[in-house]
């Protein structure tokens, strides 16, 4: 069984080598979809009976490990020195330094890496993260998925 929970957050970034508008500082209303796979829980009296995982718990874990860290932050590649230096001049600015250029593809993969251990078989129902879909805009997204063999 697959289940998916969607959350939204706002963040800024720039793609330093981009040939068009994305090389400038700008922001997005991102959406992230967390898709989990597992067996439906069949334990009378269990609050998650009939579910793969309670959607509210999917949300709270995603918020704690990704969304709240990135929401209203500037996601910046640590090698983008001029932007890193500029943001350092802003008092109490929420900056997240990344080892990768903050493209939708890299952010989706990073979110998958951060969330994968969080959801790992929490209920004994073979629960695991299957996919993270990160929307940079309503029409553009990247999927980070579990390889078939793992």
Image (cartoon, rainbow, N blue to C red):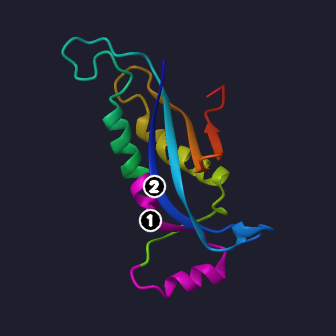
Q: SS class of the residue under badge 1? A: loop
**Range of the magenta residues?**
67-92
Q: SS class of the residue under badge 2? A: strand
Q: CA distance from mark 2 to mark 1?
A: 7 Å
Q: Is residue 32 left or right of residue 80?
A: left
Pick whichever of labels 2 and 1 is earlier in the sequence: 2
- Quarter of the rendering containing residue 103: bottom right
Which residue occupies the extreme left position in the image?
A: 45
Residue in view at x 18 percent, y 15 percent? 45
Taking the magenta stretch, the answer to whether it contains residue 54 is: no
* Marker disc for residue 54: none
Taking the magenta stretch, the answer to whether it contains residue 69 is: yes
- Above or below — where is 49 with respect to 139? above
Residue in view at x 48 percent, y 60 percent? 10
* Marker disc for residue 9: 2
**Residue 99 place in picture, x, y as percent:** 62, 64
CB under 8 Å between callouts 2 and 1?
A: yes
Which residue occupies the extreme front position in the image?
A: 138
**Residue 91 place in picture, x, y as percent:** 41, 85
């Amino acid at each position: 069984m697959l289940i998916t929970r969607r959350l939204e957050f706002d963040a800024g970034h720039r793609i330093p080598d981009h040939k068009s508008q994305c090389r400038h500082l700008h922001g997005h209303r991102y959406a992230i979809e967390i898709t989990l796979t597992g067996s439906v829980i069949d334990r009378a009296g269990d609050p998650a009976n009939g579910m793969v995982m309670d959607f509210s718990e999917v949300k709270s874990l995603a918020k704690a490990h990704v969304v709240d860290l990135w929401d209203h932050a500037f996601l910046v590649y640590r090698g983008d020195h001029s932007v890193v230096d500029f943001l350092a001049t802003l008092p109490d600015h929420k900056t997240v330094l990344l080892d990768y250029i903050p493209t939708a593809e890299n952010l989706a993969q990073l979110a998958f890496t951060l969330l994968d251990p969080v959801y790992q078989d929490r209920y004994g129902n073979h629960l695991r993260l299957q996919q993270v879909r990160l929307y940079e805009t309503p029409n553009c997204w990247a999927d980070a998925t579990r390889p078939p063999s793992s």
